[in-house]
Image (cartoon, coloured by chain):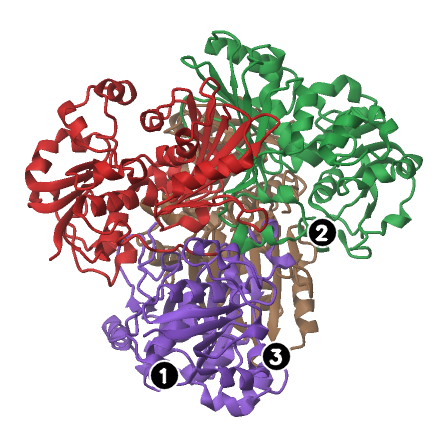
Chain colours: A purple, B red, C green, D brown
Amino acid sequence: MSLRVSIVGASGYVGGELLRLLLDHPHVSIIQATSARNAGRYLYQVHPNLRGRTNLQFVHPDTLQPCDVLFLALPHGEAAQAIERYASLAERIIDCSADFRLRDPAVYQQWYGSAHPAPAWLERFVYGLPEVNRAALTGARYASGVGCNATATNLALLPLVEANLIDRSRPIIADVKVGSSEGGATVNEASHHPERSGAVRSFAPVGHRHLAEVEQVTGLRNVHLSITAIELVRGALATVHAFASRELSEKELWQAYRTFAREQPFIRIVKERQGIYRYPEPKILAGTNYADIGFAYEPATGRIVSICAIDNLMKGAAGSAVQCMNLMCGFAETTALTFAGLHP
Amino acid sequence: MSLRVSIVGASGYVGGELLRLLLDHPHVSIIQATSARNAGRYLYQVHPNLRGRTNLQFVHPDTLQPCDVLFLALPHGEAAQAIERYASLAERIIDCSADFRLRDPAVYQQWYGSAHPAPAWLERFVYGLPEVNRAALTGARYASGVGCNATATNLALLPLVEANLIDRSRPIIADVKVGSSEGGATVNEASHHPERSGAVRSFAPVGHRHLAEVEQVTGLRNVHLSITAIELVRGALATVHAFASRELSEKELWQAYRTFAREQPFIRIVKERQGIYRYPEPKILAGTNYADIGFAYEPATGRIVSICAIDNLMKGAAGSAVQCMNLMCGFAETTALTFAGLHP
Amino acid sequence: MSLRVSIVGASGYVGGELLRLLLDHPHVSIIQATSARNAGRYLYQVHPNLRGRTNLQFVHPDTLQPCDVLFLALPHGEAAQAIERYASLAERIIDCSADFRLRDPAVYQQWYGSAHPAPAWLERFVYGLPEVNRAALTGARYASGVGCNATATNLALLPLVEANLIDRSRPIIADVKVGSSEGGATVNEASHHPERSGAVRSFAPVGHRHLAEVEQVTGLRNVHLSITAIELVRGALATVHAFASRELSEKELWQAYRTFAREQPFIRIVKERQGIYRYPEPKILAGTNYADIGFAYEPATGRIVSICAIDNLMKGAAGSAVQCMNLMCGFAETTALTFAGLHP
Amino acid sequence: MSLRVSIVGASGYVGGELLRLLLDHPHVSIIQATSARNAGRYLYQVHPNLRGRTNLQFVHPDTLQPCDVLFLALPHGEAAQAIERYASLAERIIDCSADFRLRDPAVYQQWYGSAHPAPAWLERFVYGLPEVNRAALTGARYASGVGCNATATNLALLPLVEANLIDRSRPIIADVKVGSSEGGATVNEASHHPERSGAVRSFAPVGHRHLAEVEQVTGLRNVHLSITAIELVRGALATVHAFASRELSEKELWQAYRTFAREQPFIRIVKERQGIYRYPEPKILAGTNYADIGFAYEPATGRIVSICAIDNLMKGAAGSAVQCMNLMCGFAETTALTFAGLHP
């Protein structure tokens, strides 16, 4: 018997990806997809890739009914405001926004500029990155989403952190390149095609909020994050520069990455000596849930460049959310997430 | 029990798509993928999207073994030269090249410049477009591939042809816009990124060979084809200008398109009055087997603009080939071809 | 002594190009650049390429002062509403909108849906395409702008029209591919980068208003226009399919194009037998005032494919406007329009 | 009277830019443009933007004649091999390759893997970055070119170095994003459009040779360089992460940048609080000789993110070379380098 699933905020890009994935999920049925603005329109009128896949129409969020699993794909701040209502409607909730990602209300206030509206809920939500929280997510009732830039940065850092190979006294620089879908479906001057096309925009050289998630997940306190928006729709590539805590051989690094990737169905190590695709490349990950990670090492200086590529809407948002649902509900972890990606 | 499938010429882009599709096909197993140049390398070293999906290696074409279904994804001319050998190895063959698409050896000679090397085989091959040859393909032993530009043009024209709505005495202009993957995986000066990026290249204003396939499939004799290469990797959009044979209502046109699309699992009609995606858009078809068709009509002049969008590597090549295999082998027609495509 | 020039509507893309060109023009000085929305801001805050080139600030349109030459770069309809006021302020006016392009008020009403607000002014404006109206523009007081799609189509057709080589009884299809800057600087859902990037959008398969300009300029009555928006910011390529009125040699066609191009400083014929750039390519015209034209001919069917590439903001708008000003004011026609364009 | 100028290696991208610039230079005449491969072809057959600008043809390098100024735009290693011959032909030489950039033969050997073929010439060449070597370049006979990634990095660092604001004990990370033209005009598998388009390729995470130029120019010993190739043809953006040597106010940083930019005709400081173009953007620099620099500062951590954008073929190669020539020959420094760039 299928679980009954609803998606709140289904007209955005993360909502659209949730719809795409869940429509093909063998163990769930989408019963409602809400959008205040698009209520009454067919899903495929907003997400044209769903034409012929479903005749579901958007409904107004006020009409939300009880369901088994509720996905929230709302602008930051909205889920927390109404979490009691949502919790009364659904046994399980996966919130893709930033509202329940941080454990510490003080950290939330520091980065988001106001007190958390529902601080008691913070500890009920498991941070939705299965690669670090698989056990906690299994059977859990509430999971947060993940930040896309945070996820690329975290997955680049974790192999090194877990193997304790980073010199924590030296700065760690995460320079993330991202596509335009990260800005969401809402039009603004900065997203106007003649301006955005071909741009290499220093979107957040300092001060990006995802740093809070990186510090929480990695335990590091010396990470510096910069985000550059490039010509790309989907995709994020984190180039993370760190320094080795001691002299290393490349073999030790390989071992650290392999250890991290072991039993992780969506982590692949990419490091080739030849060919075009020697390091992780977000281009070939569009639509997939993979996080490809690789590294380069410079023995003379001890610099490790750890690289992670993801599709920001998938592993960086909707894909991880569905992966969480699979764990929460006891489904095989990779269910509905097996698209291989395209080349070229 | 799985059918044993092999792919000859598996390092090209069509070969790569065949691998991607067939690896996920529940009723077949890939036993060999040949590439003279890449023999011994892992598939994922050439097709990086297959990393973690298979540990198969390319083998040299000389080592080709008997199998149940053989896909040929070779440069034009090579399949026909060796068809006897291939036929001795496999019960069923699907040839993605142009070698067995044309029924008439004289037409072949006219367009390809030399006598067909195996003319007796031409009539054994069914033209591999299920939308027109479903019955003939069901259970067939040999199917040809389809030309991508031909397919976009044919699927734009067929609804009108079948409903007999075109004035055959007036010229029909098919202006096709295509992505760079149509040129294949072989490097050349024209495909050098600094030159090709952002280009709007009048690749074949006249004289494109796919016209022969259009004439064969539609029975029209007044079609004029032009190909323009644009900034795009995957995708083809045919904008076909034809004139109505009589005064038409838009309703009649809708009926013609709906009649054509009926029971066609991969044909969708796209014609919206509002929104961004009013007509077929190749962008959202990357990786899918859909052919989206739509139209605009100008009553004052009788001009019908019929529009078809496809992914040239899928519906225009590998996707149609797998669809043919499904029909030839008695599998459900859509097996392994259900990827919905991405938005945005 | 410099002429005093002002630009109304200077914050749009055509306005920005006028600023760029006129700042480098040796015989004029920009005295005012108006923008209701940006009054008080520096020009370079809207047009970042002008940083360090001028310290001029936008002024409110209500403060417009008398000047020698006035450029109007307003949304369609606004110039005509206030033409009396503008004419009272400036000796010479060049209006880049569609308001004064058509000679016949009835044709204006047919295409723009309402009666022309100042029909008496239509005959005072010279259509601003120097390639057909050089004599009339020389010393003229009022010039209209040109439509970008119309210009690409007209310049593709004129060599054939002037040599009387087109069969006027057969349809002429103009399939124009355009970049996103054609939609102007105003944000809308269709221009949102994640949606617009990589699109091949059938923007106006039928019914585009520029057809009126094509009919007026070429005298043809059988032209059919379709516009497809592709991945490109600047540029338009018209692929025009026409049929020869009689048997032609390629030499005759060459002669027709050469005759047309003679003494036209911005027309180049592009038709090469080898190399990457065999036909006109808008990519290399960004920022230039060139219109490159070329052709392909199919003797068996009589089809002529005439191809014209322009930068829609330059030869299709601001460049032609400055070229008109040069003629109107007695400057050398190419003044301030000599940028060669970039490769790659 | 014009100086007689020749360009060796004129069919590459840097050679093409030299041709474009020098054809419009009022004080020089191009007398020869060599290309072994293209001898006899018109320049515009390789550089289509030069059509109608010159009827010059490529000549074979063996036919090189004496001239006043010789530009060498050859693959690395070739200029040094034949420098005696070139010096016998020309009073002044500007070499765009890496051959004469480094002062110390040992450093050359370290980075380029073999002994320098003409070490005595190293000290005769002035490093061709006018922003640091203006006095030495004025009247000089020999100038080297600059590395494009090095130039973006150097110009990001120099304001901080000259004001002594960097903590030299902490690592400095330069993460450079570059376009495909940086790879030159020679085709290779990595530049094949279907592979390169949309890629975010970790081209040189460690070990890029331009670091040698950065160390030489800045005197810093703690710089770490990584190069990522993104979807872009022209342009380089250096995002340089450094740490302040002491507590700083933003005002002090502004002062450092302004001091550096003073009297530098091609340096602009870009740092806006609003609008789309808040930081340097390579997109609007295509074809210009500007280096736009800006910064962000994070007081809590002391991190300074210094950002420099250039056109790699211009300020990063041909533009700087012509700027050098202007200084060497006593022309106004900005001659032939005044193109403003395009928006959008």
Q: Chain of mark 2?
A: C
Q: Is residue C326 left or right of residue B255?
A: right
Q: At which x and y percent is residue D24?
A: 62, 32
Q: Is disc 3 in contact with disc 2, using a CB cutoff of under 8 Å? A: no
- Residue type at tag 1: Leu
Examine the image and state in which quarter residue D259 appears.
bottom right
For marks 3 and 1, give the one nearer the viewer.
Answer: 1
Q: CA distance from mark 2 to mark 1?
A: 56 Å
Residue D87's spot in the image, x, y percent?
A: 45, 36
Residue assigned mark 3: D299
Rendered position, D290 above or below C312: below
Cα–Cα span, label 3 and label 2: 29 Å
Q: Where is mark 2, residue-wise?
A: C52
Which residue appears farthest toward the bottom when viewing the image?
Answer: A120
Which chain is home to disc 3? D
Residue B317 position by quadrant: top left
Residue drawn at (24%, 55%) of the image:
B45
Q: Residue C176: horizontal and vertical position, in percent? A: 56, 32
Q: Are marks 3 and 1 on the same chain?
A: no
Q: Which residue is mark 1?
A: A137
